[in-house]
Image: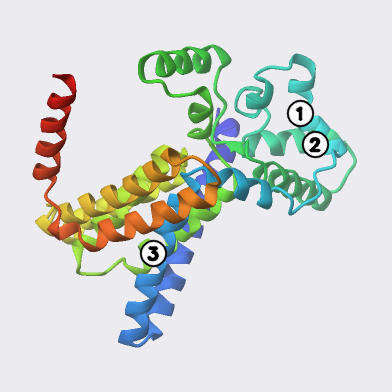
């Protein structure tokens, strides 16, 4: 049992080490910036995180994932074939096999690489391991966070589709991470760290709701975690309670992101038309958010809905 848990403990320790290192670097960088530069940096990182993840939650992600999928030659190697052996033998899950075949989590991939060639060097194994990991990460299918059972996946996918109309591809996506989503997570982490000690709670609310909504729609588990961290930070900074400004930020970010993604998916034609239209409408919505009455919009919608029914 201890031997089985060791790789997971090492991965968790590495994540904590990496996070602490990034935070220390960010604090050092922020501390050396003058006030105006710091404010501009905070604004830029926040906007980059919000809009980049909004794009990944829209139809744009298909084109972007294809583009980043060409960075490394994906010609199969002996190590790659060993990792895919379970799928080759069983054809479990079709394109979703990485989540189901028990060979594609970081720990499982390492074990498969070590078993491939008995007399290769550790350096060769490490090189092959990271190469195969990046090759899989750059594809839209990405890599799983853990291995799921096919029976459990199919049952959950059927329930979500029958009850809420959610496709099985979303269920797969929310349990995996690819290179595009990893980039979205990294820019989110930078935005959170640059605004870590900011007194304006509305910004925390804006970042949190924007990341949460884009992460849920786009199926990015790391961005959802980043959103939860932002919410927890705002809660801690304000003596363990949520202020009105934080709630305003939540509404502003959620509505702005929601309007953008809804517009992109609604408008037919080339993707760029939906992106530009969604961007314009979202910017206007964010700018005049304080003048928008959600109650008036709701009343207007209900009034006109009744007229249509009548």
What separation in Å lies between label 3 and label 2 (alpha carbons)?
38 Å
Contact, CB < 8 Å: mark 2 with mark 1?
Answer: yes
Residue that mark 3 sits on: 47
Q: Is residue 292 above or below residue 85?
A: below
Mark whose residue sits in front, 1 or 3:
3
Q: Nearer the viewer, residue 23 or 40?
A: 40
Q: Is residue 224 visible?
A: no
Q: Is residue 36 left or right of residue 21?
A: left
Q: Residue at x 9, y 37 (%)?
A: 299
Q: Which disc, if any, is residue 84?
A: 1
Q: Is residue 233 left or right of residue 104?
A: left
Q: Nearer the viewer, residue 78 or 183?
A: 183
Residue that mark 2 sits on: 80
Of labels 3 and 2, earlier in sequence is: 3
Residue that sits furthest to the right in the current view: 119
Q: Which disc, if any, is residue 31?
A: none
User: Quadrant of residue 302 in the image?
Assistant: top left
What separation in Å lies between label 1 and label 3 (alpha carbons)?
39 Å
């Amino acid at each position: 049992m201890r031997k089985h848990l060791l790789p997971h403990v090492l991965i968790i320790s590495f994540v904590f080490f990496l996070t602490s290192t990034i935070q220390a670097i960010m604090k050092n960088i922020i501390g050396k910036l003058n006030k105006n530069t710091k404010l501009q940096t905070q604004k830029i990182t926040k906007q980059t995180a919000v809009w980049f993840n909004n794009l990944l939650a829209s139809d744009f992600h298909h084109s972007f994932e294809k583009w980043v999928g060409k960075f490394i030659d994906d010609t199969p190697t002996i190590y790659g074939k060993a990792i895919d052996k379970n799928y080759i033998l069983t054809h479990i899950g079709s394109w979703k096999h990485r989540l189901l075949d028990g060979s594609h989590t970081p720990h499982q991939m390492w074990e498969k690489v070590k078993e491939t060639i008995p007399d290769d060097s550790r350096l060769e194994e490490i090189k092959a391991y990271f190469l195969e990991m990046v090759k899989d990460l750059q594809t839209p299918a990405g890599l799983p966070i853990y291995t799921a059972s096919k029976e459990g996946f199919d049952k959950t996918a059927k329930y979500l589709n029958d009850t809420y109309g959610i496709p099985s591809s979303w269920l797969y996506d929310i349990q995996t991470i690819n290179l595009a989503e990893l980039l979205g997570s990294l820019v989110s982490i930078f935005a959170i760290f640059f605004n870590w000690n900011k007194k304006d709670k509305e910004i925390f609310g804006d970042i949190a709701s924007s990341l949460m909504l884009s992460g849920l729609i786009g199926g990015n588990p790391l961005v959802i975690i980043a959103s939860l961290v932002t919410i927890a930070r705002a809660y801690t900074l304000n003596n363990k309670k949520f202020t009105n400004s934080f709630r305003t930020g939540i509404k502003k970010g959620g509505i702005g992101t929601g309007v953008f993604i809804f517009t992109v998916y609604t408008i037919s034609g080339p993707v760029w038309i939906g992106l530009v239209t969604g961007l314009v409408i979202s910017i206007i919505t964010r700018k005049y958010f304080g003048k928008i009455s959600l109650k008036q919009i709701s009343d207007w919608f209900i009034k006109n809905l009744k007229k249509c029914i009548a």
